[in-house]
Image (spheres, coloured by chain):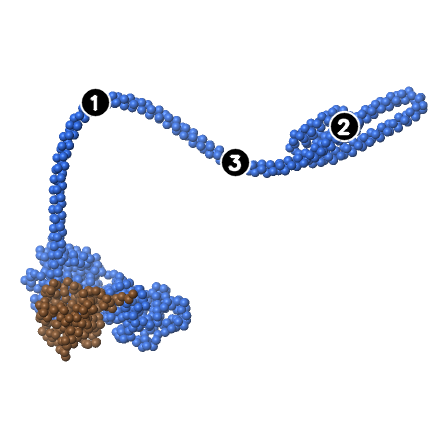
Chain colours: A blue, B brown
């Protein structure tokens, strides 16, 4: 993990700042990792952490550097060359802050920092930059390089941005480069960083402190104060009052009130004793690490930081223990009771130090064999370890804490000595235990309790005032109500008189009522009948409704049918329009043809007339011919008779023959004429036949013409018997056809 | 609009009672608190001097020395008084001599290599939220840098505003009323 900081200071104006105290605690929480320089960074090792800064602001020198030196961590400073020794006036959104100057950077390098490059003017290294500009940004001036000759091997991309073109150039100038989120996290030139803020918590393990108290109320505030004024605060503090009969509860509650999110106070109604109290407290303390503090003892102010650090650094360690700093009137006496090897220094005639052994193997041996207790009861332990071995036990040979830590070490958890801090262990005389108010902390706690009590009293006073006011108001209200009551009594008397009158009225009304009741019964019967009638009508109604539905469905079908027909009608309408148009056309043509027919009819008439004349003539001629034939026969008959007269009459015959020939010629002419006419008529027939197709739908005028033709042809057909009747038949047929077709 | 500096840089902009500019104003006249005349401060000086262990001190540092009212009486072969208010130090310099010297600085700038380290450090009214804000631990580190092992640290603060504790064995803690407040005096041995 590579961490990225910008500004570390005593204030937090924006998200780019982390307070120094928070930074201290974040650094403390890295104790279980390995903090390294970038050159040594192995991204596959989960424990590796690099601490980097971009900027570099002067406040990093003032606030972060001392802390990093305190923890002995290496760190990397990515400087923007153009800002060294200047201020950040160009940054419109951020409060004014100065950048570190060369002397300050140099001082940090002496104390464990390395300098790296963050470009000259902090531009975005994307493709918009020309190659020349890019190179200029990446070039480290000699004046800065001198400050850390071993540095400037790494580049931090401004805003974490880079492009392919940038990468190519960067690879030639640096051994690696850091982005923020844009990199692939794998290549040395694309490593990503975690931006750290005031809210960041690099560790999530929680520490709980338990202060059990039985009648040590006088010391409790001091013990709690030592817990609440630690360099690294615990996450939870539990103060347990095992049914004390002194001021423990007062102090305990005051502590809870003044630190509501940190301190919880619990009071047992009955005394449960040490083991039950301890086990119950740890059960309710849901933290990763737990440490007990006797209510009459104190922690030095870095006790929690150092003990937690020891547990953080090695997950195999189950309990972290310290030396004693004995104090109090009986301390020197107790001190001398310890074996000489364990007696440490005396400090300011106030503290007598007891040193416990720190060789792990030795400690494991003496603890598991039960020979010697070198791990005191206020050692910080992993809750997991307590749970695994089943917690504290009663009625054992050894004191309960020795018994617990023995079993924890026996279960395989390692013990580890914590350096640099002490449990301040009070040894007091019985008189001192009864003495009052030992410390400023007690005063504070009691003052807190007093102010709470005052507040409660105030609120009761206010309530009493309110109730008093309320009561007065109610008394006023009561007298008002009494007056109203007198008024109402008057009203009541008045209403009573009224009521008597009305009672009399009521009797009258009651009699009326009986009559009306009769009526009502009558109406009820009527209503029932009507009800029945209604039921019947309703049934009818249902039937009708059914019918209606049925008709509706039928209507719908018909409507659909109508739709279809309408569409057909439309179509037909269109067709009719078309046909009408055609009809008009044909009418026009018919008119034309009519005229022609008329003309032709006239012609036919003429021809017919001629034909009839011709046929009449023919008939006449036939008749004549018959006559002449008859005459001929007669003549023949008489010929015989007259053969004798033949010769005499030969010339007569010859004259007759010549007359016959002439008649024959006339007839031939007439026949030729009629043939000619017949052929003409044929032609016309053909035309008519052609027109037949066209004139299917004949008009009345044509029928009229037909009728006239009929009259003519009717008179002809009965009398036509002559041999050249074929052509006449033809003529007749054609006229009949013409009639039909017209 | 002129940008607002932040944190330490913004001290000149802050409106808290005891900021340098305002302290400078305050100290314009020599004895603004009326230290010499005020019985409360006379008591303060007496209590402090009584609690200093009886032993030899080669170098003494008085952090938050004000106008040097107490500094002049401190034991030590070499005594340095430090305060953030320029005006206060100007007045304090009246006490300056071979043994006594004064310096304007805030706690974060004090580095041990500039003037060495001390056997006795007195801190008066420095570890308040309005001074150290969210960097109390860094101020403690600075003090630790300046204090020799086995050295004595005496912290004098108004109890209502003081929430620090130093990571050394506290040999004594006493409280006494001071003006309208309660003072707490703690003696530590490193």
Location of residue A284 in the rendering, given as x and y in whole percent from the top left corner: 19, 56
**Callouts 1 and 2 on one subunit:** yes
Residue on which disc 2 sits: A612
Query: Residue farthest to the bottom?
Result: B98
What residue appears at the point 32 percent right and 68 percent down from the top-left corner?
A90
Indicate the quadrant containing the C terminus of chain A: top left, top right, bottom left or bottom right: top right
In the drawing, what numbered circle is on residue A685?
none
Query: Residue farthest to the left?
Result: A431
What residue appears at the point 53 percent right and 37 percent down from the top-left corner?
A567
Chain of the residue on which disc 3 is drawn: A
Tell me, yes or no, if residue B157 can be seen here.
yes
Q: Callout 3: 10 Å neighbours few (<14), some, many (20+)? A: some
On the picture, is A334 further left or further right than A320?
left
Foreground residue among A695 and A581: A581
Residue on which disc 1 sits: A508
Residue at disc 3, secondary structure: helix
Residue on which disc 3 sits: A566
Q: Callout 1: 10 Å neighbours few (<14), some, many (20+)? A: few
Q: Which comes before the other along the chain, label 3 or label 2?
A: 3
């Amino acid at each position: 993990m590579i961490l990225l900081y910008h500004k570390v200071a005593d204030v937090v104006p924006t998200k780019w700042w982390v307070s120094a105290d928070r930074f201290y605690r974040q650094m403390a929480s890295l104790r279980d990792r390995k903090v390294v320089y970038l050159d040594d960074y192995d991204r596959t090792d989960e424990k590796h952490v690099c601490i980097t800064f971009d900027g570099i602001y002067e406040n990093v020198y003032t606030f972060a550097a001392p802390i990093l030196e305190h923890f002995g961590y290496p760190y990397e400073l990515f400087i923007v060359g153009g800002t060294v020794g200047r201020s950040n006036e160009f940054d419109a959104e951020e409060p004014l802050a100065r950048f570190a100057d060369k002397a300050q950077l140099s001082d940090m390098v002496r104390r464990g920092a390395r300098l790296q490059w963050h470009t000259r003017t902090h531009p975005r290294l994307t493709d918009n930059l020309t190659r020349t500009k890019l190179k200029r940004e990446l070039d480290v001036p000699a004046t800065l390089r001198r400050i850390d000759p071993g540095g400037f091997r790494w580049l931090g991309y401004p805003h974490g941005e880079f492009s392919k073109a940038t990468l190519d150039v960067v690879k030639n100038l640096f051994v690696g480069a850091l982005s923020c989120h844009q990199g692939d996290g794998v290549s040395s030139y694309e490593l990503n960083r975690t931006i750290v803020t005031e809210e960041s918590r690099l560790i999530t393990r929680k520490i709980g402190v338990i202060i059990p108290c039985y009648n040590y109320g006088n010391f409790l505030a001091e013990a709690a104060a030592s817990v609440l004024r630690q360099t690294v605060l615990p996450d939870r503090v539990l103060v347990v009052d095992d049914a004390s009969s002194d001021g423990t509860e007062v102090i305990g509650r005051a502590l809870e009130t003044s630190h509501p999110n940190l301190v919880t106070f619990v009071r047992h109604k009955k005394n449960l004793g040490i083991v039950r109290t301890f086990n119950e407290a740890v059960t309710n303390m849901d933290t990763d690490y737990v440490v007990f503090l006797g209510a009459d003892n104190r922690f030095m102010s870095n006790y929690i930081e150092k003990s937690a650090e020891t547990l953080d650094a090695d997950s195999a360690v189950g309990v972290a223990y310290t030396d004693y700093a004995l104090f109090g009137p009986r301390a020197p006496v107790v001190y001398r009771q310890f074996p000489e090897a364990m007696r440490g220094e005396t400090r300011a005639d106030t503290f007598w130090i007891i040193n416990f052994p720190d060789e792990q193997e030795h400690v494991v041996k003496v603890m598991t064999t039960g020979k010697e207790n070198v791990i005191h009861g206020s050692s910080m332990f992993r809750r997991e370890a307590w749970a695994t071995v089943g917690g504290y036990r009663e009625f054992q040979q050894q004191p309960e804490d020795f018994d617990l830590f023995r079993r924890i070490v026996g279960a395989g958890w390692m013990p580890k000595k914590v350096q640099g801090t002490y449990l301040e262990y009070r040894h007091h005389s019985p008189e001192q235990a009864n003495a009052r108010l030992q410390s400023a902390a007690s005063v504070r706690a009691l003052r807190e309790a007093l102010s709470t009590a005052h507040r409660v009293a105030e609120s009761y006073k206010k309530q009493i005032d309110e109730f008093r006011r309320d009561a007065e108001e109610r008394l006023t209200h009561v007298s008002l109500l009494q007056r109203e009551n007198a008024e109402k009594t008057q009203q009541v008397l008045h209403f009573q008189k009224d009521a008597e009158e009305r009672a009399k009225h009521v009797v009258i009304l009651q009699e009326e009522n009986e009559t009306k009741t009769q009526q009502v019964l009558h109406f009820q019967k009527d209503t029932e009948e009507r009800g029945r009638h209604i039921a019947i009508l309703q049934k009818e109604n249902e039937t009708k409704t059914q019918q209606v539905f049925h008709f509706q469905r039928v209507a719908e079908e018909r409507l659909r049918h109508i739709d279809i027909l309408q569409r057909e009608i439309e179509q037909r309408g269109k067709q009719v329009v078309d046909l009408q148009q055609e009809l008009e056309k044909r009418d026009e043509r018919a008119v034309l043809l009519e005229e022609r027919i008329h003309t032709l009819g006239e012609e036919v008439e003429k021809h017919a007339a001629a034909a009839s004349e011709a046929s009449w003539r023919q008939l006449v001629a036939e008749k004549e011919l018959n006559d002449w034939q008859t005459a001929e026969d007669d003549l023949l008959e008489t010929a015989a008779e007259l053969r004798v007269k033949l010769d005499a009459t030969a010339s007569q015959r010859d004259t007759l023959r010549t007359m016959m020939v002439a008649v024959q010629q006339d007839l031939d002419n007439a026949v030729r004429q009629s043939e000619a006419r017949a052929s003409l008529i044929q032609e016309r027939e053909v035309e008519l036949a052609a027109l037949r197709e066209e004139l299917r739908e004949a008009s009345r005028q044509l029928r009229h013409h037909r009728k006239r033709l009929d009259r003519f042809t009717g008179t002809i057909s009965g009398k036509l018997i002559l041999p050249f009747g074929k052509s006449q038949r033809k003529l007749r047929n054609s006229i009949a056809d013409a009639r039909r077709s017209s | 609009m002129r940008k607002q500096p932040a944190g330490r840089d913004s001290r000149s902009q802050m409106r808290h009672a005891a900021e340098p500019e305002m302290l400078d104003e305050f100290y314009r006249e020599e004895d603004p608190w009326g230290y010499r005349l005020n019985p409360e401060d006379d008591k303060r000086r007496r209590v402090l001097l009584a609690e200093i262990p009886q032993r030899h001190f080669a170098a003494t540092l008085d952090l938050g020395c004000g106008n040097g009212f107490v500094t002049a009486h401190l034991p030590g072969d070499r005594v340095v008084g430090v305060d953030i208010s320029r005006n206060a130090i100007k007045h304090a310099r009246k006490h300056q001599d071979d043994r006594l010297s004064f310096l304007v600085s805030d706690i974060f700038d004090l580095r041990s290599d500039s003037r060495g380290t001390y056997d006795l450090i007195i801190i008066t009214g420095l570890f308040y939220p309005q001074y150290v804000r969210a960097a109390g631990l860094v101020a403690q580190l600075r003090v630790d840098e300046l204090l020799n092992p086995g050295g004595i640290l005496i912290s004098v603060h108004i109890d209502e505003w003081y929430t620090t504790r130093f990571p050394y064995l506290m040999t004594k803690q006493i409280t006494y009323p001071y003006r309208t407040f309660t003072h707490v005096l703690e003696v530590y041995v490193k």
